[in-house]
Amino acid sequence: MKNQANDSMVRIATGIALAAAALLAGCGGGSDQADDEGKLYVGYYQEDPTNNPEDPTPGTLIARLPPESGAFEGQMPFSYVGCMGGADVGTINGTRSTSGLDGDWTGTVDSVAVGGAYRGTYDAGADEFSGTYTNAGGKVHVSGGSDCAHDIAALGTWKLFGGSTNSPSDFVISSSGGTTPTWTWPSQGATVYYLVRVFDHACLNESVTSSQCMMGEGQTLLPRIQYPAEFPSAKPLKDGGSYLVAVHAVNALNARQVGFSTRVDKP
């Protein structure tokens, strides 16, 4: 979905800037505080590689879930690597029960309408949700100018974590701190590139579906990235703020995610 990994690596390696829209500092992070209205869960989705072997893209998934049964909502930003500049943000909504989530998602990718069902189960011991989603329109081929084209899968999988996560366990984000931090992490291999997204934590707590919550999005071939220098069109971080950082490690040979890590920085 809106991602061409090999093309991304070429652009980064040659120094061509990518267009962009858009857990505790110094200690690796912690879980989001729960309240009567809910708690932020952060995770990822992965397009099915069998249905969409051309470019089975992973992406970020964020939801605000009630402590027990009730309505929920969230967002799933789509990568800006596509046929049109700017990041598209899909929204999700539905109902949480004691056993899992039942909802729907909707959005546009390169001006093409997409959406379908979200279904998943809850692991209370780990405080994690996982499941599958579908695109009601099936697999969609999208084309644009300059011979650009990509595919949107008909289905995929997803996972949400109730606190900071590191998968694999040694894939941990470190921060230099401040409002212009450099984030680093262990390399996940020579063929891996990294998609990094930054969100305003307060914005997510106030309106988890808002596209304005994304501060910046960047890609790098290196196990480090500097903010905001390597995040085209990034918004500045502010002293006293709280920012969610999510790093996806993606194997460029098959566009599959091989690592995922989150933290919260507080300049």
Image: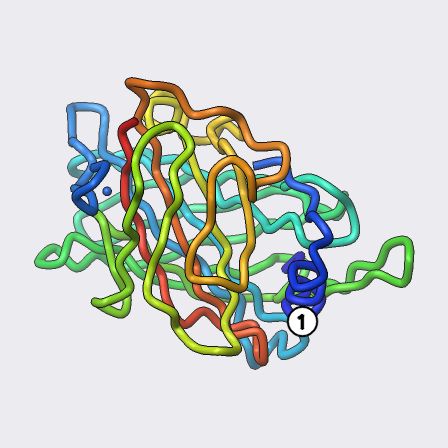
Q: Nearer the viewer, residue 115 or 46?
A: 46
Count of picture labels:
1
Tell me: residue 220, above or below residue 241: below
Between 247 and 15, the one nearer to me in the picture: 15
Could you tell whether 167 is left or right of 144 in the image?
A: left
- Percent from the top left, x then y, of residue 157? 43, 65
- Determine the image quadrant of residue 180: top left
Which residue is outermost to the right?
146
Q: Quadrant of the C terminus?
A: top left
> Which residue in the protein does label 1 denote?
6
Say which element carries label 1: helix
Q: Relative to 115, is 139 above or below? A: below
Give x and y (percent) for residue 182. Answer: 39, 44
Residue drawn 35% across the image and 52% down it:
43
- Colour approach in the figure: rainbow
- Relative to residue 44, is residue 176 drawn left or right? left
Residue 120's image quarter? Answer: bottom left
Question: Residue 261, how many percent across, how many down?
Answer: 32, 56
Please give left or right for residue 178 compared with residue 8 in the image.
left
Q: What residue is shown at x 34% (from left), y 38% (from top)?
A: 244
Q: In the rendering, at what x and y percent does residue 265 appear?
A: 29, 35
Q: Residues within 10 Å of mark 1 (few under 14, many from 20)?
A: some
Residue drawn 8% across and 58% down? 125
> Looking at this view, is 237 or 5 the one in front?
237
Name the residue furthest left. 125
In the image, what residue type sits under mark 1?
Answer: Asn
**Which residue does the image show at 20% across and 47% down from the upper left?**
28
Check the image and report above or below for 71 versus 139: above
Quarter holding the N terminus is bottom right
Q: Is residue 203 above or below residue 263?
A: above
